[in-house]
Image (cartoon, grey):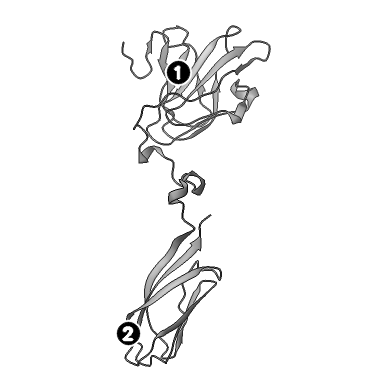
Amino acid sequence: MSRSHGTLVDHYLVAPDGAGNGETLHLISSRGVPVDTIYYNPVASRTGVIIDPGTEDGQRLTVVNTASGAYSITFATGATSNVAAGTGAVIGQNQAMHFRWSSSLARWVGAYGTASISDGSITTAKIADANVTLAKLAAGITPSHVVKYAGTVTWSGSGATYAPTVSGVVAGDIVIATIRVKPTQAAYLVRVVPSTDTLTFELSAANTSNDAQISYQVLRAAA
């Protein structure tokens, strides 16, 4: 059994690729044959999607998101989409949503669920950007802090303190620093104080030669 773009095979239909929001998924193929499963590649995340009304009470329909990327299908409001859950009905990549038509409600309702995904099929490309949260990490690898900024600064100002700008730093951060290139004038690193967008380094003596280099890491509590 085979299927191609826009072609009905048995009770399956491959819908035309998505071209914009507010698209309608039709229940009748170009050959005039009813379908109960629609494969739809949205190409990009789509909103306002509509399904044709059902034709008889209890009619079944499954919509499968075949996107090659992390793109979702979100339906329009119930009155527009004919889906009871309205905008709350969202189908993620490689997921399916199963419906039954309710004549009394004039809406598609029923069991919503995900399609089975084989072991090893979830690749990095299939995980949406910025969607791995701290709560998803196992206790053994959950960090208390993360490195937010790191770098090396060369001394300036010829004094015992130097306060370069490090955008994003806040007063509550933790800073680890070390002397990478020692100053000509004998001195050691006394402390580093973080404040808004600034790190203030203090040496035990003025570095009048401005040749000291300090490397640092800024840690912030994981959240």
Which mark is in front, 2 or 1? Answer: 2
Give coordinates of residue 181: x percent, y percent.
Answer: 31, 81
Query: Which amino acid is tagged 1?
Result: Ile
Which of the 4 image quadrants contains residue 75? top right
Q: Residue at x 40, y 72 (%)?
A: 216
* The label number, if any, that marks residue 6 in the structure image: none
| Residues packed near mark 1 inside 10 Å, few (<14), some (14 to 19) or many (20 plus) | many
Residue named by callout 2: 182
Give coordinates of residue 130: x percent, y percent.
Answer: 46, 47
* The label number, if any, that marks residue 38 in the structure image: 1
Query: Which amino acid is tagged 2?
Result: Lys
Cα separation between marks 2 and 1: 68 Å
Secondary structure beneath label 2 = loop
Q: Nearer the viewer, residue 16 or 9?
A: 9
Q: Nearer the viewer, residue 18 or 130?
A: 130
Give coordinates of residue 112: x percent, y percent.
Answer: 55, 23
Say above or below: 134 vs 53: below
